[in-house]
Image: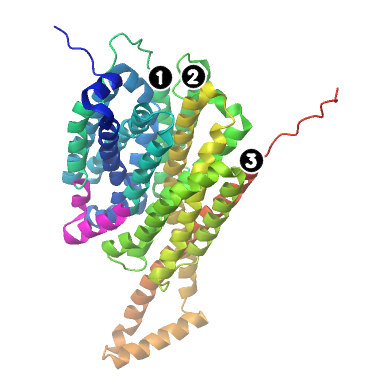
Amino acid sequence: MRSVPSTVDSLFEQYGPAYKWLATATVMVGMLAVILSLTIVNVAIPDIMGSMGMQQTQAQWLSTGFLASMTATLLANAWVVETFGQRTASVWAMALFIAASIVGGLAPDETILILARIVQGASAGIIQPLAMITVYQVFGAHERGKGMGILGLGVILAPATSPAIGGVLVDLFSWRAVFFIALPMAFVGMVLALFFLPERYNDERRRPFDLMGFLLLSAAIFAVLWGFSNGQRLGWESDPIMLALAGGGLATVLFIAHQLRSASPLLNLRIFTVTGFVCGAAIAAVFGAALYATTYLIPLFAQQVQGMTATNAGLLLMPAGLVMAVLFPISGVLSDRLSPRTPILAGLLVVTVSCALLATADVNTAFWLLAAWIIMGRVGFALIMPAVNAGSLSVLDPRQLAQGSGALEFSRNLGGTFGVNLLSVTLDRRAAFHHQALNEELRPDNAISQTLFSRLGELFQQGGVPEAAHQLMAMEYLRSMVAMQAYTRGFQDSFLLLAVAGALALIPAWIIGRKRRRPPRNAP
């Protein structure tokens, strides 16, 4: 005899009013596991680079690979849930995440490691939206705000604490430990899903999956990312790079054309014709780029320029994350009471100033001054996010809210993916540019070089170094100083580029809250 599928109603009958909290805890545990894994690896990147001999442009795939695959599968979530049900989708996605985490922790080389991160991201793209769907189902209309607030707090707290946790793990054990820390939560989430998430109705109509759209989107994202990340190493005009960028561009055009013709598109592109929504999507993309890029760049800067331990680099980000967690609910209330334009403009201005200040950081910048600049940026992010969601979705037809929410999340993640990638390329290119420029100042006929050589010679002589070795040691010392200074300026240019992006985002922010003038009643 076939058993009756467990629906939300039947689970309420089985567990009573407490079921909404059991279901919320179930999806939150799984979501915290994947969000923790998204950000915790950033603080371990310098150690991974040293262990595996990876260049910075290769190491950024540990972040962008996760984000790119999560962005693609995020759009497939609706079909997966409709086809397999929340329970099966959650269990299998979590199992895939656990397997990828184990492979990443045991990876023998960078290729396996990056592939493991891509698979982790693919499973995260299924797990994250499940949490919002579940909370929407188990809370009544008058309580959904509370449910979403609890969920939002969890989303913020995980990245707030993960850098510090990751730093401690790296210093006490090794970078491999960051891949295993989320496994207990993921396993608990998978077991709880077997009991507390609903199954699929057998009589539900299954809509076709837009496989062609998914493949075109994935090809476009990964081809362009690969081209950008390897352009400096292989040459921007080399055949592989030109082919990758051209292929990515072609795949993008084909994806757009296919989505406009498809009866069941992955992404409803027609909602991007609404001015207020497209402005919100643009701001969301800049938001994602700035948030994820700073989360990637700051630990790298702290460890490779300032010489911090992984623990201290993680602690550098922790106060800002906690401040953002505290302000997030408050900014949600403000977004209900004010025009979206006000908090978005204020938030973007604060983020722009924060990035501009980070663009002045160097080896001598104090820990708490850096932390204060980062906190400033997180205050801006807390102001932006709820207002962008409210302002963007409010201009859509109620029937388009689900599609708009998914498109907004897609824009944010896509911005984060390319933000990390482009800032990584910028860091590499600008560091190489400054290195070449500074090296030209080390000519023997340069007055500054002669003064430095003379001063270093005096110091070496005082230290008992043979005179014959003075020039060689001075050159080696100055070359190392030039390399460090060039790398520092590369970071400064990268943060400055983020400040420019934040300033440009003020344009759509000004438009998003603008109300159309209505003609007078007696107008013809």
Residue 202 makes an appearance in the image: yes
Magenta-highlighted stretch: main secondary structure?
A: helix
Residue kind at label 1, given as amino acid type? Met
CB contact under 8 Å: marks 2 and 1: yes
For image coordinates 57% across by 29% down, the residue present is: 272
Circle 3 residue:
513
For image coordinates 36% across by 10% down, the residue present is: 205
Q: CA distance from mark 2 to mark 1?
A: 8 Å
Q: Left or right? Give the position of 379 relative to 112.
A: right
For image coordinates 53% across by 19% down, the residue present is: 260
Circle 1 residue:
212
Residue 483, x across and y down, in percent: 39, 67
Disc on the earlier residue, 2 or 3? 2
* Residue 173 counted in the magenta span: yes
Residue 216, x across and y down, in percent: 42, 25
Residue kind at label 2, given as amino acid type? His
| Front one among 119 and 368 | 368
* Residue 483 counted in the magenta span: no
| Front one among 192 and 207 | 192
Residue kind at label 3, given as amino acid type? Gly
Q: CA distance from mark 3 to mark 1?
A: 37 Å
Q: In this figure, what is the number of numbered marks?
A: 3
Circle 2 residue:
258
Residue 172, x across and y down, in percent: 17, 61
Q: Which residues are magenta?
A: 161-180
Q: Element at badge 1?
A: helix
The C terminus, quarter of image: top right
Q: Is residue 39 above or below residue 145?
A: below
